[in-house]
Amino acid sequence: MQERLQLFLKSEGLSAAKFADKMDVGAANISHLLSGRNKPGFDFIAKMLERFPALNPDWLLLGSGQMYRQLPQTPVTASSEESARQFLQSPPVEEQLEANPAARADVEQHKSMPDIKKVVILYDDRTFEFFDPRMQGQ
């Protein structure tokens, strides 16, 4: 499991210290797990699966399957196609913000939110790929 924990942290872009923060445990506990000195207990594994719901428990515990769970497939409906068409035909965001000062204020408020580091795309065949917005245009 030590190797899978290391792979998971790398996949999530987490340092051992950040992972410890997310798990509400001491950094030394994570260090011991990653070095193989200690093995994770049931409570730790349950908390990890709760904090990272996309993580596949079969992969974490047994090393089988993909790292991330398969997401349920959402069927394409006429209403979702119509919504997409309306979105594509709507005016650019800049124009919408000029016309609606309340929306502009909302956008300004959310600018202080953390930047997206990575997007994981999960496919129904249990494969996945990563999208890193920092790598756009390179």
Image (cartoon, rainbow, N blue to C red):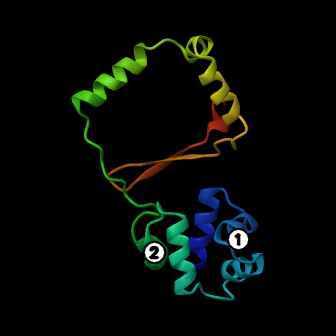
Give the quadrant of the C terminus: top right
Q: Amino acid at mark 2?
A: Gly
Q: Secondary structure at mark 1?
A: helix
Q: Position of residue 83 (x, y in %)?
A: 34, 25
Q: Position of residue 137 (x, y in %)?
A: 64, 28
Q: Compared to 21, does 123 lie above or below?
A: above
Q: Nearer the viewer, residue 43 or 71?
A: 43
Instruction: Kindly identify which residue carries mark 1.
Output: 20
Q: Compared to 77, does 54 lie above or below?
A: below
- Which residue is pictured at 72% across the width and 63% down the height? 18
Q: Secondary structure at mark 2?
A: loop
In the drawing, what numbered circle is on residue 63? 2
Q: Position of residue 55 (x, y in %)?
A: 48, 64
Q: Amino acid at mark 1?
A: Ala
C-beta proximity under 8 Å, tags 2 and 1: no
Q: In the image, is 1 to the left or to the right of 25?
A: left
- Which residue is pictured at 70% across the width and 71% down the height? 20
Disc 1 crowd rating (10 Å Cα; few below 14, some 14-19, many 20+) is some
